[in-house]
Image (tube, rainbow, N blue to C red):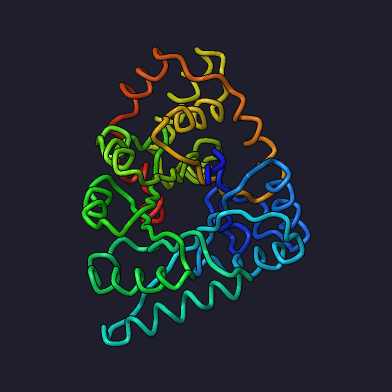
Amino acid sequence: MTHSKITLGTAQLGLNYGIANKTGKPDIERAYEILSLAQQSGINCIDTAMSYGDSEVVIGKYLEQNSAWRPNIITKLKIDVKDKNKLREKVNANIEQSVERLRQDNIYCIMLHDFFDLISYGEKLMEILLDIKSKGKVLKIGVSVYSDQELAKALEYPELEIFQGPVNVFDQRIVHSGLLNDIKAQGKEFFARSVFLQGLFFLEGKKFFERILEALFYINKLSKLASEYNLSVPEIAFSYVKDNPKIHSLVLGIEIKKQLEDNVKLLNVMKLPRELKNEITEIFLNIPEKVRDPRLWSK
């Protein structure tokens, strides 16, 4: 099945998620409005996780009431097992719980939420997931990564078919690593997340920038670039990722219906000029890690 260019990210449906989140977790009515708009807009892929609060439950209830919509669902598996002899039991229980919460017969993809679970449990974990896949509960197996180094290591596991990682104007590592070529050559799939860097590109205000003063310098550069090319910052940020033919879909977290409306409109923005892409590479290729990695923002 061909994926829609936008994948609905649903962390915000279950949690107060994202540094730019002003409205908090939506109530069930607003969550259903977002899911309904995704359905109407032709979005056929949803990204969620066991650790996203009650996101799976909200999605499952909506899909049960709107059975004509059959999107591909990617959910993420978080493993916390000290006794490796209990690994199979834990994985099976978690996947059964997700299937039940999502109210599905099977799940399009189970993705390892933490790359280091792959390192910790390796081939034994792959054996368990392949067994579950053979029984029809899961169609594909994947992993979420944070860097090109993690992606390179993940590609050593032939069982993995779908990869998700950060790609944006400020984080170009995976794009310039050449690994997307390898994924395409192997007939596998790559989903880009953090396209707007959790909304960092749109933030204003002294309080935030005192925490990441370096971010203000680069955001000002991005705003200036947008002005020079008569584009908006969202248009540049979205199209930079959308224009890459090796990226199957963009995972976009949504807090309110209007955000999704705006993102769907961005699908119609023309491709960025080559000159602009070259400037993006030149200006933003080597952004400091504490600016491009949200995990470091609070430190």
Q: Residue 136: image x %, image y %?
A: 47, 69
Q: Residue 163: image x %, image y %?
A: 37, 51
Q: Quadrant of the C terminus?
A: bottom left
Above or below, 180 relative to 131? above
Q: Residue at x 33, y 23 (%)?
A: 283
Horizontal side, residue 137 vs residue 141: left or right: right
Horizontal side, residue 208 vs residue 264: left or right: left
Horizontal side, residue 264 vs residue 202: left or right: right
Q: Residue at x 74, y 63 (%)?
A: 28
Q: Can see residue 35? A: yes
Above or below, 219 relative to 152? above
Above or below, 282 relative to 48? above
Q: Quick one: 71 or 49, which is closer to the camera? A: 71
Could you say which quadrant of the image residue 68 lies in? bottom right
Q: Residue at x 53, y 60 (%)?
A: 48
Q: Quick one: 283 or 28, which is closer to the camera? A: 28
Horizontal side, residue 169 vs residue 43: left or right: left
Above or below, 134 relative to 248? below
Q: How many tags in the picture?
A: 0
Q: Quick one: 197 or 102, which is closer to the camera? A: 102
Could you say which quadrant of the image residue 53 lies in? bottom right
Q: Residue 273: image x %, image y %?
A: 45, 14
Q: Quick one: 99 or 59, which is closer to the camera? A: 99
Q: Residue 18: image x %, image y %?
A: 53, 52
Q: Can see residue 120? A: no
